[in-house]
Image (tube, coloured by chain):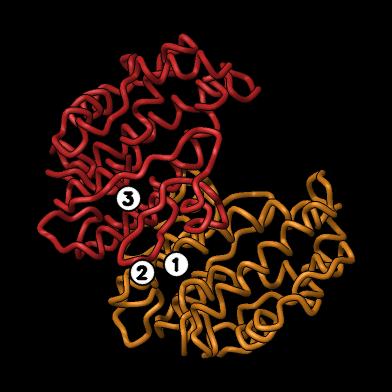
Chain colours: A orange, B red
Amino acid sequence: MRVMVALRLKGVEYELLQETMGKKSELLLASNPVHKKIPVLLHRGKPISESLVIVQYVDEVWPPPASILPRDDPYAAAIHRFWGQYIDDMFPPRIRILRGTVPGDKDEASDEMTTALLYLEEAFVECSKGKQYFGDDSIGYLDIALGSHLGWIRAVERIAGVELLGGAKVPNLAAWADRFCGHPAVVDVMPDVDILVEFTAKLI
Amino acid sequence: MRVMVALRLKGVEYELLQETMGKKSELLLASNPVHKKIPVLLHRGKPISESLVIVQYVDEVWPPPASILPRDDPYAAAIHRFWGQYIDDMFPPRIRILRGTVPGDKDEASDEMTTALLYLEEAFVECSKGKQYFGDDSIGYLDIALGSHLGWIRAVERIAGVELLGGAKVPNLAAWADRFCGHPAVVDVMPDVDILVEFTAKLI
């Protein structure tokens, strides 16, 4: 999803090759032999792996006006990168616990995700400067980094019966999430929460 | 060490504020309230945290000729970022196991580190294009990312009695490691392996 949103923001056409659960294509194994996982962007015959690495590659290869990392503002870019890394350290392992696909303390996972969202609520206020997105007027790196987890955050609220974005604790972030999901570059690639809930029910 | 090497490559003077083991300064807690850990770069009164985020900030703020990420080559930059992330996922947890500061299977940790170093041996051949460093003729992002672990890699070879860089499996990487440690931007900030070994012996 991160890669597709980045390409859509830049107005770049792409072909989506889907992988099937449980068996990996030869092309995937050849393109990302280290991690053997999606996403991989194939561009000019060369593979690029790791979603946030790809997002930066897309930002550097395709010129503005659409800019993903703040341009000519190294401090703002550092803030986006800092939170991008934080999000990927914090959310995926705790989402897996709340989905029930790995063992772990669900209350603890939910509390830690809430703490993370409270930090990000603060970061949103600072980065957006009263505008719509972390990237100010337009979707940026941090919007993509956090936004790609929204489907699963909302799904685990239902699966585990917890309040994360849904409570009243992070009002700015909750409003941002609705805006992000409705953005033209996002709306067609955001997974449906019902499907994520159903998919998890079949797995466990 | 990553931050100091980056600043030295750029020829930027800095003041080093050391933290004392076991108690965190007020300045550190105020500057990095999320992770409460070093390194933090304070520049123009603003804090930047997370070592590889800081390295990219330094690269963007201080102009070439010294360039840390490959310039005007988004694919090469993506390769550097990919391996930088891989290194930080792979090495620190396994180094802690081999030091004996956290429990875990030492043989497995050593085997996994060897696998990682074999990948990096290949990456070195591709990135360096027959030159001295991952960054071609000069030290780049990936040199800094991997180089900052060399002290501990060599220390755990002695602490755990394992062969990592010391064996004959990664000859290009072993030669690179010696070159890196002797580089003028590195030589004064590379920790002494004896001291790391001694420090670990006192901890456990």
* Residue type of the residue flagged with mark 1: Ile
Mark 1–mark 2 contact, CB under 8 Å?
Answer: yes
Chain letter, disc 3 residue: B
Name the residue at 60% across, 84% down. Answer: A180
Q: Nearer the viewer, residue A10 or A44?
A: A10
Q: Which residue is mark 1?
A: A79
Disc 3 secondary structure class? helix
Residue for point 57% across, 19% down: B100
The residues bearing labels 2 and 3 have C-alpha atoms spaced at a distance of 21 Å
At numbered mark 2, what does the secondary structure look like: helix, strand or loop?
A: helix
Amino acid on which disc 3 is placed: His
In the depicted structure, whether residue B91 falls above or below residue B25: above
Q: CA distance from mark 3 to mark 1?
A: 20 Å
Q: Position of residue A128 (x, y in %)?
A: 51, 83
Q: Position of residue B10 (x, y in %)?
A: 17, 53
Q: Is residue A79 above or below residue B2?
A: below
